[in-house]
Amino acid sequence: MDNILTHDLHISAQTSARNEDLIDRIAFGDMDALHELYLQTSASVYGFALSITKNTHDAEDVLQDTFIIVHRKAKDYSSSGKALAWILTIAKNLSLMKLREKGRTTDIDELSNDARFSVSDGTDEMLILRSALSILDEEERNVVMLHSITGLRFKEISGLLELPLGTVLSKYHRAIKKMREFLKEKNNEK
């Protein structure tokens, strides 16, 4: 178990260092680096934007705008080993601006409707997954999506969402418990 954890931390550190290097290269106009950073992080950015906007079109707009800003602001980025957190902060701000522009605060049932985030090919399973995610409040859903899709650590999520670490941990565990109970009930209905 310790070997697996050490291996995962090593891979995470390598990815983080690679993202830092890519942002440095982008700052000097390297478009290949921007493309590579996009390939490595776009699923995380899109998933996070979707968890906030709850609309696939808005999430796609946020994804595109995020990387435009990354390209423009790469020279202003100060390396701190948290490149993904910086990118997701940009996505968060753009997502919130998108919501304010539209004056929309109600949930739209598009979360996990996108094939890029399908964990199941079965329609029944997707409906159950969507239902399980829909029982969570917005902060719980964001924490679950950030941890599950982007692989961010709870401390990073805490900083990104501007919530205390204990709150992030309790929201995550509460959300997982809610989803397990929901799925257990659905399984018992069969």
Image: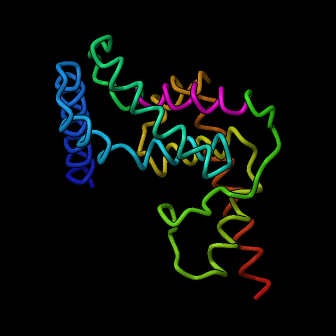
User: Residue at position x 63%, y 81% from top?
Assistant: 123
Residue at 58% x, 47% y is 144
* 137 lies above or below 88: below
In the visual, does 66 lie left or right of 71? right
Tell how many labels.
Answer: 0
Residue 98 percent across, percent down from the top left: 66, 32
Query: Residue 100 magenta-drawn?
Result: no
- The answer to if 89 sits in the magenta stretch is yes
- Quadrant location of the C terminus? bottom right
> What residue range appears in magenta?
87-99
Q: Main secondary structure of the magenta part?
A: helix
Q: Is residue 159 above or below residue 61?
A: above
106 relative to 23 in the view: left or right: right
What residue occupies the far bottom of the structure in this picture? 190
Q: Give the quadrant of the N terminus.
A: bottom left
Asked if 122 appears above or below 94 in the picture, the reply is below
Which of the two residues, 148 or 51, is positioned nearer the viewer here? 51
Which quadrant would residue 66 be assigned to in this image? top left
Q: Is residue 99 above or below residue 145?
A: above
Residue 64 is situated, as x and y percent measured from the top left of the image, at 45, 39
Residue 94 in the image: state x and y as whole percent. Answer: 57, 28
Q: Which residue shows up at 26% across the image and 35% down it?
A: 34
Across and down, in percent, residue 67 comes to: 39, 33
